Amino acid sequence: MKILVAIKRVVDYNVKVRVKSDGTGVDVANVKMSMNPFDEIAVEEAVRMKEQGFASEVVAVSCGEAQCQEVLRTAMAIGADRGVLVETADELQPLAVAKLLRALVDKEQPQLVILGKQAIDGDFNQTGQMLAALAGLPQATFASRVTFSEVNGQMRATVAREIDGGAETLSLKLPAVVTTDLRLNEPRYVTLPNIMKAKKKPLEITRPQDLGVDVTPRLKTLKVSEPPRRSAGVLVPDAKALVEKLKSEAKVL
Ligand code: AMP
């Protein structure tokens, strides 16, 4: 079974981002970039599936600028077998990424595509769902556990997902699309020997036009602004004073 894992290069989650002075977006100049945390979980899960004998090959895919090669090398250091970069300097919105991934699904014919549930930069939470729709594949989003079984010679995935009211379990016919939630696993640390080994793994570079995909943005960002500053809090001496303030000032009791 071949697994395709989609990984996005985003501003590192430890960085406090700043809005550009002209309000057109977030300033990413000289900012530390890393693999989207949910995608690290996706790579880890795919590599575990290979280690457990369910998968034969793990292919990491990233769409974006040439620097996305860095996150592909990280994915290969975690254990992915090879990488594919769809290189473009154009801004990529979720629909464009879903179309690119769909073209790669047609080409690579994976049995499973794993994506993060959302990228922490745009917080869209759309790409996996759009890919499933475009490729006509079953989907299970926000996976917290994935297992496999064979029913009448057909491989199926059983996916536990966390929902508002508790947990839901879905059974999917493969090929399918799965998106990862935080609790699926804890990604391993990449070791130096594996970083060195990853440098020798194959990394293919292709372009949207090679895949016949038009990536023209459909959404226009009108303005990006900082959230309003929070006013300073007030220290209260004890619980009685707090209850009094909640009653008389906040009027929530
Ligand atoms: P989003 O819909 O933007 O929140 O992203 C959801 C998931 O889609 C991410 O966690 C990635 O797995 C995948 N994804 C989004 N953008 C890209 C990209 N440019 N390259 C590769 N994968 C991506």
Image (cartoon, rainbow, N blue to C red):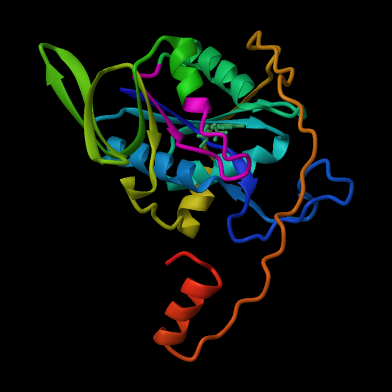
Number of marks:
0
Q: Is residue 171 above or below residue 65?
A: above
Residue 114 included in the magenta stretch of the image: yes
Residue that extends furthest to the front in the rendered view of this protein = 248
Residue 124 included in the magenta stretch of the image: yes
Q: Quadrant of ligand 1?
A: top right
Residue that extends furthest to the left in the rendered view of this protein = 152
Q: Which residues are magenta?
A: 110-128
Snapshot quadrant of residue 230: bottom right
Residue that extends furthest to the right in the rendered view of this protein = 22
Q: Most prominent secondary structure in the magenta stretch?
A: loop
Residue 234 lies, in percent from the top left, at 59, 81
**Quadrant of image for the N terminus:** top left
- Give the left or right position of residue 129, taking residue 55 as reference: right
Snapshot quadrant of residue 8: top right
Snapshot quadrant of residue 45: top left
Q: Nearer the viewer, residue 172 or 56?
A: 172
- Give the left or right position of residue 232, taking residue 166 as reference: right
- Give the left or right position of residue 70, taking residue 51 as reference: right
Q: Residue at x 39, y 52 (%)?
A: 187
Residue 72 lies, in percent from the top left, at 56, 39
Q: Residue at x 53, y 20 (%)?
A: 101
Residue 136 lies, in percent from the top left, at 41, 9
Q: Nearer the viewer, residue 222 or 83?
A: 222
**Quadrant of image for the C terminus:** bottom left
Residue 75 lies, in percent from the top left, at 49, 42
Q: Nearer the viewer, residue 229 or 101?
A: 229
Q: Residue at x 39, y 55 (%)?
A: 188
